[in-house]
Amino acid sequence: MWNRVEVKQRGKVAFKRNYGPSLLAAFVLLFSTGTFLENGRQIFLRVEPYLSYDVSVMLSKVFLLGNIVVAVYAIFLGHVLEVGCCLFFTRNQSEQAEPGHILAAFHSENYMNIVKIQFLKNLKIVLWTFVFIVPGIIKMYEYAMVPYILAENPGMESKDVFKISKNMMMGRKLDFFVMGLSFLGWQILSLLTLGILGIFYVNPYIQATIAEIYVSNKANALQEGYIQ
């Protein structure tokens, strides 16, 4: 079982050892699902009351089109990049990972399997969130290991990927949540620096730590025999 202090320390060492590529991978991961458009939409909602009707309608159409474009981008590019970044940070835990790992999923003959499983993961989380917020959050943590499992096993069937992720996170969801809270101070500092600290330190630090958690979960899964 992993310990929060230990995985954070190992994550810090791993990303500092390979700083430039780690920074790149974390930056790509930050934009892998089109969150930049969501930020733009939030700004638009705040200023909309001060805009003229014509400008408001035009911008609404732009964001509608943008949402469609981002959905397509997220499904076929963004979520695949997420798997590639997870591969990078997983490899970087024990070796000097290369930036090429970020694009590895696109070169895989199992590209469409990655697209399908990542789509199903996000669909399940959204549907559970519609039922109630708490089940959606639980599913989000339950499936947290999915992109890491896919990174190393791109051809694995969806039912096996979800089952393994569920087993890996069983009894560890609260620990994972607390681990996220432990970065709150860093994230506040990142906001105070307009995201600069996040780009150059906090984001790669977080992603390297999550990769350490996956490696620990994987070792435990191998020991318990529910993955081969």
Image (cartoon, helix red, strand yellow):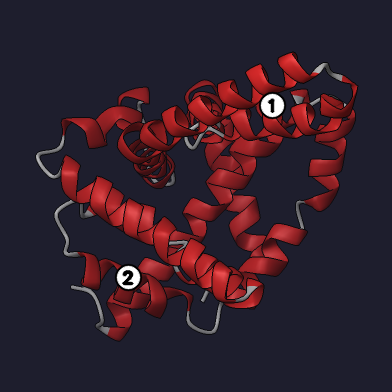
Residue name at image x 90 percent, y 30 percent? 192
Q: Residues within 10 Å of mark 1 (few under 14, many from 20)?
A: few
Q: Can residue 18 be seen?
A: no
Residue name at image x 37 percent, y 24 percent? 99
Answer above or below: position of 25 versus 132: above
Asked whether 116 or 59 is in front, the reply is 59
The CA span between labels 1 and 2 is 33 Å
Residue under pointer 1: 40
Disc 1 or 2, which lies upstream in sequence? 1
Q: Residues within 10 Å of mark 2 (few under 14, many from 20)?
A: many
Asked whether 99 or 188 is in front, the reply is 188
Q: Nearer the viewer, mark 1 or mark 2?
A: 1
Residue under pointer 2: 162
Number of marks in picture: 2
Answer above or below: position of 158 versus 135: above
Query: In the figure, residue 214 lies in which quadrant?
Result: bottom left
184 sits to left or right of 107: right
